[in-house]
Image: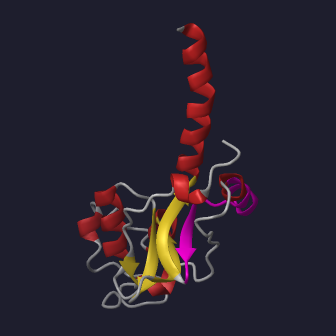
Amino acid sequence: MEDLLVRDIMTTDLISIDRHLKVAQALELMHAEGVRRLPVVVPGDRLVGIITEKDARLALPRVAEAGGLGGYDGLSYEGLHASEPPSVQDVMSHYVHTLTPNRSVAHAAELLAAHRISGLPVVEEGRLVGIVTAYDIYRLVADALVRPRVRAAA
């Protein structure tokens, strides 16, 4: 496990989003795809930010009260008129901790813990190529702990 690289565990089937989309659309996409964060890219898969489910929910605090994601029409957003729902670029994190595919999984785990974040986009030559999440690390650790027990029981 010590020799594993980020490229060995990163998710490469990425779902990313354009910074001009509305926050409600980002939240709908997260729910539809079962993810809690979306890298924000510009043409050429250049990473410019990340939006999390928490970011989106804070930007749309009354969505749930309005009957779900489709009920955001007519809500007033702090500092914006109801006709101007926030876009992804208004609420995304512009500074994003990233990794390269050749970094160690141990380094990824250290970054996740040190910055108290749950996902790290993986960038190579300026392009988004993957993402590593805390769940990926948990799964790796769980597999490492369970396999020896299964072999011992056999």
Coordinates of residue 50 in the picture (x, y in percent) = 51, 75
Would residue 124 be counted in the magenta stretch? yes
Q: Residue drawn 30% across and 90% down?
A: 83
Residue at horizontal 42%, vertical 62%? 12
| Magenta stretch: includes residue 60 | no
Q: Is residue 102 above or below residue 94?
A: above
Task: Indicate the quadrant where residue 114 lies.
Answer: bottom right
Identify whether 76 is placed above or below 103. Answer: below
In the depicted view, which residue is nearer to us: 3 or 88?
A: 3
Taking 12 as reference, is 91 left or right?
Answer: right
Residue 118, visible in the rendered structure: no
Q: Which residue does the image show at 47% across and 71% down from the upper left? A: 129
User: If the image is split into quadrants, where does the N terminus sit?
Assistant: top right
Instruction: Choose top left, top right, bottom left or bottom right for residue 27.
Output: bottom left
Residue 49: image location, x then y, percent: 53, 80
Q: Count all numbered tags in the image, as a single digit.
A: 0
The spot of residue 43 in percent (x, y) is 38, 89
Residue 100 position within the rendered picture, expressed as x and y whole percent measured from the top left: 61, 70
The residue under the point 66% across, 58% down is 108
Q: In the figure, 1 relative to 148: above or below?
A: below
Residue 32 in view: yes
Q: Is residue 86 left or right of residue 109?
A: left
- Residues shaded magenta: 109-125
Residue closer to the observer: 32 or 43: 43
Quarter residue 101 falls in: bottom right
| Colour setting | secondary structure
In the picture provided, is 54 more to the left or to the right than 99? left
